[in-house]
């Protein structure tokens, strides 16, 4: 956990879906020595993400846990629909419209949203406003056609 103000990043998905983008971001998170919590907006999304993390690449998987698995503190990645942080994660990924209840205790908070979904775009705008109202600095990243991230704000 972290007492400093977190970096808040918004990732606007346009050319690749969440199940292609999130594993790469998680690998980078783990490579930095950080633990992660992924908060999904629904149990259905949570189940799909759990499957994706086991199968996203033939030669690799991302070990993770969720409620009912036990030993939460041992999992480098924790999946939830709630606001808990049982593995002491420094990075929190917000997907599928999940909402933050507290911005404290993280190095980084990452919102990922589907740019082709009008509801997701409206929700991301509201989340951006909430982050700014909380006095945090946010950055906005948009996917290029080649799948690279370009900072736009």
Image: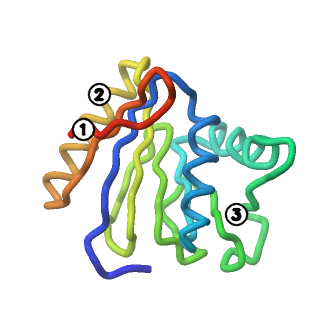
> Which residue is at the front of the view, 148 or 17?
148
Q: Which residue is pictured at 72% across the width and 61% down the height?
A: 64
The alpha-carbon separation of the residues under discs 2 and 1 comes to 6 Å
The alpha-carbon separation of the residues under discs 3 and 1 comes to 29 Å
Toward which corner of the image does residue 55 lie, by quadrant?
Answer: top right
Q: Residue furthest right?
A: 58
Q: Which residue is mark 3?
A: 67
Q: Earlier in the sequence, mark 3 or mark 1?
A: 3
Q: Residues within 10 Å of mark 3 (few under 14, many from 20)?
A: few
Q: Residues within 10 Å of mark 1 (few under 14, many from 20)?
A: few
Q: Which residue is mark 1?
A: 126
- Circles 2 and 3 in contact, beta carbons < 8 Å: no
Q: Which residue is mark 2?
A: 122
Residue 38 picture location, percent across and down: 55, 55
Tag of residue 109: none
Residue 43 picture location, percent across and down: 64, 43
Q: Which residue is pictured at 77% across the width and 73% down the height?
A: 70
Q: Earlier in the sequence, mark 2 or mark 3?
A: 3
* 123, above or below 135, in the image: above
Q: Which residue is pictured at 16% across the width and 52% down the height?
A: 132
* 132, above or below 105, in the image: above
Residue 58 picture location, percent across and down: 86, 42
Toward which corner of the image does residue 6 lie, by quadrant?
Answer: bottom left
Toward which corner of the image does residue 37 lie, by quadrant?
Answer: bottom right
Q: Secondary structure at mark 2?
A: helix
- Circles 2 and 1 in contact, beta carbons < 8 Å: yes
């Amino acid at each position: 956990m972290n007492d400093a103000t977190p970096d808040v990043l918004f990732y606007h998905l346009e050319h690749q879906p969440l199940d292609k983008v999130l594993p790469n971001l998680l690998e980078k998170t783990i490579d930095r020595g950080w633990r992660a919590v992924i908060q999904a907006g629904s149990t259905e999304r949570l189940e799909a993400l759990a499957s994706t993390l086991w199968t996203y690449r033939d030669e690799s998987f991302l070990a993770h846990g969720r409620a009912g698995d036990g030993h939460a503190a041992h999992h480098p990645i924790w999946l939830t629909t709630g606001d808990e942080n049982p593995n002491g994660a420094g990075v929190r990924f917000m997907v599928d419209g999940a909402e933050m209840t507290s911005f404290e205790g993280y190095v980084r908070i990452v919102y990922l949203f589907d740019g082709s979904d009008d509801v997701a775009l409206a929700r991301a705008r509201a989340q951006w406003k909430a982050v700014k109202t909380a006095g945090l600095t946010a950055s906005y990243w948009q996917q290029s056609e080649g799948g690279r991230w370009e900072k736009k704000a």
